[in-house]
Image: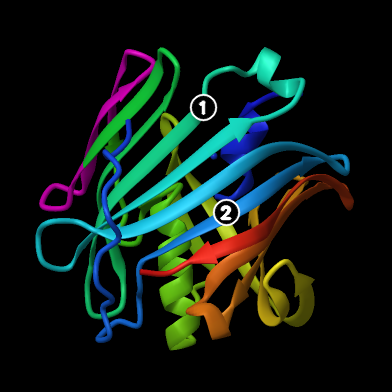
Amino acid sequence: MNKALFASLMFGVAAAPCALGDPAPESGLQPFAAHFTAEWKGIGIATSDLVLRRDTAPDTWVYTWRIAARGIFRLAYSEDLLQSSWFTLGARHVHTNRYAASEGSQQVKLDFDWDTHRAHGTSQGKPLDLILQDNTQDVLSIQIEVMQDLRNDVLPAKFSIVDKDEVKEFNYTREGTEHLRTALGELDTIKIASQREGNNRILHMWFAPSLGFVPVQAERTRDGKSEFAMRIRSLDRP
């Protein structure tokens, strides 16, 4: 079992924990803490936590994702995988400012300069200098951008996403609605598919409009067969 599966599931160092902030009614975006169970071939192998909170500056936010292996998998993967994205929320879209990830001694750090449309930083000690498009996101901010796009009913067909040490192009498809039975009860959701061109892996994500478009389930398939899934088990609001 490769722990890289964790990072690539929902879209691939961290902010210090603090209290959740106040909601942003003008954008519809609200702080939350969502807790998931991660499954590999039907076996629970990890817990996963997504936390969105306000940052200190106006209209700025921090989104963090922590994955911790459990059971016998903890023996092989003793270090938690922690990712954070700092972003500004405009009238409709997300503008990522900074991204960091760590798993033990392995680290990725990126700063986004939108005046020059470049991202600078390091990946495993290797310097990075990446060219950005107007809609480029990191592997965490893309999730918030999709939530906002679904809220405004304007989901684009393509996104460019900074993943590790390169910018990759992904196709996004809205696959309709689906009624799910979850640990939170029965939910009506919008199902989205994400796939890199030329890749046989597809990531499906289910977003719940009644919960502010928070993701409640994700599953990655390869050639139509499930590889990995995450299912929500609880959701906390301020």
Q: Quadrant location of the N terminus?
A: top right
Residue 119: x and y, percent?
24, 39
Vertical position of residue 62 compared to residue 40: above or below:
below
Q: What residue type is labelled 1?
A: Asp
- Magenta-colored span: 112-129
The residue shown at (58%, 44%) is 48
The residue shown at (38%, 21%) is 107
Does the segment drawn in magenta span residue 120?
yes
The answer to whether residue 140 is seen in the rendering is: yes
In the visual, does 8 lie left or right of 202?
A: left
In the visual, does 116 lie left or right of 153?
A: left
Judging by the rendered image, the residue that carries numbered circle 1 is 80
Does the segment drawn in magenta span residue 182?
no
Disc on the earlier residue, 2 or 1: 2
Judging by the rendered image, the residue that carries numbered circle 2 is 35
Residue 72: x and y, percent?
77, 20
Q: Is the magenta region chiefly helix, strand or loop?
A: strand
Callout 2 secondary element: strand
Residue 61: quadrant of the picture: bottom left
The residue shown at (77%, 43%) is 39
Question: Depth check: 127 or 179 in front?
Answer: 179
In the visual, does 213 lie left or right of 222?
A: left
Residue 12: x and y, percent?
54, 39
Question: Depth check: 185 or 123 in front?
Answer: 185
